[in-house]
Amino acid sequence: MTLDFDLAGYLAREEGRVEAALARAMDGMEDRLSPELHEAVRHGVMGGGKRIRPILCVTAYRAAGGTCDDGIYDLAAALELIHAYSLIHDDLPCMDDAELRRGRPTTHRAHGEDRATVAGAALIPAAALQAWRASGALGMDPEARRRVVATLMEAAGAGGMVGGQWLDLEGEERALGADDLDGLHRRKTGALLVASLIMGAGAAGASEAVMNAMYRYGRAIGLAFQIADDILDATSTAEALGKNPSDTHLGKSTYVSLYGLEEARRKARAQVEGACAAIGEVELEAPALLALARFVVDRRS
Ligand code: GRG
């Protein structure tokens, strides 16, 4: 069913619309930040990347019957603001101490550690405000708006990305078992991917069955995404990835160190099949979601 789907064309179109929404978000922050800090924020947000989280959000929205085509991109941009903050902070000297991100110097290398730290922090409330305002502009009722902001903040917080980051730091130089590795990545990487789908489908007023399918799809592609990330870190180059491979040097347990390359690839494919099955079970006509699930493991960066 996905064979005829023009994923490259779809990604190019969607990326363009996400970029426009992010540019609007950056303009909206300009009068509240000094020019230097605004530049650091822009460096972290506008520096490329696949934009997979907002693209999943708008794709889930449309698959669930959403029709307000422009406004959904402003809601989806809130996910990318959280993602951008996490990358800025993850690259800091006290974290991964990375030089390169998306083929350019990391935010702290380009703008200094103090500005990068504050720029990342500024993006967290900015994302919550972005989600609140965009959900209002979409005409969502107050309870649905509250849920959409709570979904984003819960995924970003201690039970999600930040909690996963801490487990990741604690796990350095230790050999983690399968359950610990899954638990860590369901929080660190998976939670925001799940939130992308739930926010998009929720904004469309999806039924409980569809929300449930989106949740299962998101959980599966979340793990597949991280397995693919570990495989790329082990097999690719800084030039192709736009960042330096770092897992070995940081002493991290990965799906490759735990299972080996071939088994890790098999596990990623199995998660993709599970994700597609979840969509099939509720009979959603969503070729873009099926194609995106495969993209998560076939991507080159
Ligand atoms: C509070 C100091 C402090 C640090 C916390 C929250 C956090 C920093 C880090 C979260 C960890 C993290 C960066 C998770 C995401 C991991 C991941 C797979 C990133 C790559 O995402 P892609 O491939 O990147 O979507 P692009 O560049 O395409 O957007």
Image (cartoon, rainbow, N blue to C red):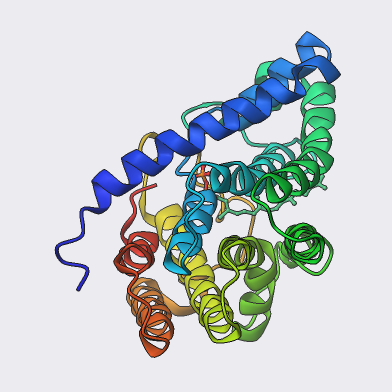
Q: Where does residue 34 sit, x and y in percent of width and height?
A: 83, 12
> Would residue 124 be seen by someone viewing this image from the given angle?
yes
Can you say which quadrant of the picture contains the N terminus? bottom left
Q: Which residue lies furthest to the left in this view?
A: 4
What residue is rendered at 45% in x and 70% in y?
224
Along the viewing direction, whichever of 233 and 77 lies nearer the viewer: 77
Please tell me whether residue 272 is drawn above or below residue 197 in the rendered image. Answer: below
Residue 195, by quadrant, is bottom right
Does residue 266 appear to the left or right of 3 in the view shown?
Answer: right
What residue is rendered at 42% in x and 39% in y?
15
Residue 181, by quadrant, is bottom right
Along the viewing direction, whichever of 29 and 242 lies nearer the viewer: 29
Q: Where does residue 225 sit, x and y in percent of width and height?
A: 47, 64
Residue 142, by quadrant, is bottom right
Does residue 31 appear to the left or right of 41 in the view shown?
Answer: right
What residue is rendered at 57% in x and 83% in y?
212
Q: Which residue lies furthest to the bottom in this view?
A: 281
What residue is rendered at 82% in x and 33% in y?
122
Q: Where does residue 235 sit, x and y in percent of width and height?
A: 36, 54
> Would residue 99 be seen by someone viewing this image from the given angle?
no
